Amino acid sequence: MQTQAAQATHPAAQTVQHRIHLTNKERQIRQLLLETAAYIEAADPGREPIVLRIAGGWVRDKLLGRDSDDIDIAIDTMKGEAFAHHLKEYMQAKGLHMGTIATIQVNPDKSKHLETATARVFGLDVDFVHLRTEIYDDESRNPVVGYGTPHEDAMRRDITINALFYNLQTEQVEDLTGHGLADLQQGVIRTPLDPVQTFIDDPLRVLRVIRFATRFGYEIVPEVLVAAADERIKAAFSKKITRERVGVELDKMLRGPDPVRSIRLIVDTGFYPLVFMAPTEVAPDTVGADHLATLATHILGMVKHHHMLADLGLFTTALDDDDRRNLFLAASLMPFRGVTYKHKNKDLSAARQVVCVATKLSNMDGDIVQALLSQRIREVAIRNYQDENGLDRMTLGWCSFGARPLASKWDLAVLMTLIGDLTDVAVGAGGLDSFTLESQAAKDVLATYYKLLASIRFHQVENAHDVKPLLDGKEIAAALGIKPGPQIGRYLHHVMEWQLTHAHATKTQCIEYVQVRFGKGGQGVAASTSPTSQTSSTA
């Protein structure tokens, strides 16, 4: 269930416009669409009048005084594609240009339950659909779609603030659910119909409720949160929702203004194991408690908010939106930190599999999360802190060189390792209510990573990821008198260790090292002693 902290901190009244003010371009589009409707009616005098409405997000955003280019035209008596073709015909007759009409076919995996026509009109993308009603069954989130009335179309939508219409003929906002305008004014998220039925019909709406609540900072009404936590909804979610759609909603939350509250709501409603679904091979008792995701994302937000990153010496390169998203993605997977499982005799990272399989994000996303949650930097940081003089250049250099695929953003892994340790401190303190960055335990953790970063800067290995081996595989093979092959990788690894220790070495000196170290035929190759070899590649 939700906690008070999971709700909007200040669901204050919102500034809502009393009427919608169109831009010049929007006025042009409105006039053109009305003329097209009249053109269609004139060609078929017996047909019902065509009423055109802009639906959904555009209406909401315009009432909030925000610009929006998300124009969805809902048509009451004909399909969107047919209207779009009439529009193009009318524009051509007037000597106006209209872009190609693209028909977006039904694609439930991308939340497209209705054929949609889209075209570029006066420089803006406009979608055309007919008003609809949806009938769901118990097996799928894909409804049977039919023509509907404006009221039916409004009531089948996910939340009331997304169910408003702007009538192009009357220039009035239509609130057919009876709650949309008030909820927009008061900063409230509610469903048009009973939330249990709304969520059973399409359980993905639970995640959409969370996303819109955190996007706008709105409060979710209690009955919606109670319904979201209903076991019937969770069962329907597992049965109906594709993993691709889960990933799309999660990604939008992580890129939104409040990923901390998003993850807290996912945890509080009991949806964490449904969104971040563990591989079946992972033993449940090896995965940390769901609330670790809440703790980690909160602490990450706290550290960023307190502007501590520069004080620690982190990020000579500014964090961009992708960095922020990747950090919160990794923090949300804190329960899987250090968890591996066997698959075909290989140790695989559970966190990486959750990213790639459970949320269907990219393989690169999985690689980045794996690197961010690796425990290798923690091992180096602790050893460096315990050693009065700090560690050697080679060992410290692997913090940068070994943090692939992060490359120049290797310090993201330092930050996430720090967040993991502070999360452990918060657990030891009894939770967020008792956690403070001013506690001695937190200060000790911060000091550990401050010294690590200071040591890395002292040895000037911040850019070790850019270091290229003095010898390539062919040159190593020639120096040792062996044939190139997979074993060359081991020699290259040792060459990089040697280069980190010998910052100003030449190629000739490197050849001499290889020949002395490994001997003729390369028989002297040994296991690497670098920090990266101490754990599996997926730990």
Image (tube, rainbow, N blue to C red):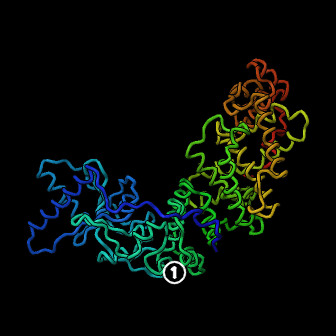
Left or right: 534 in relation to 4: right
Q: Amino acid at mark 1?
A: Val
Q: Position of residue 166 (x, y in %)?
A: 30, 65
Return the residue nearer the eye: 456 or 478.
456
Q: Position of residue 24 (x, y in %)?
A: 25, 49
Report which quarter residue 269 is drawn in. bottom right
Instruction: Reply above or below: 241 against 414.
Output: below
Left or right: 122 in relation to 241: left
Question: Which residue position is annotated with label 1?
Answer: 196
Left or right: 100 in relation to 479: left
Residue at (50% x, 66% y) in the render:
208
Instruction: Reply above or below: 102 against 380.
Output: below
Residue at (43% x, 73% y) in the render:
142
Residue at (51% x, 59% y) in the render:
215
Residue 236 can be seen in this image? yes
Report which quarter residue 403 is drawn in. top right
Query: Element at badge 1?
Result: helix
Q: Position of residue 505 (x, y in %)?
A: 77, 20
Return the residue nearer the eye: 238 or 326.
326
Q: Position of residue 220 (x, y in %)?
A: 54, 70
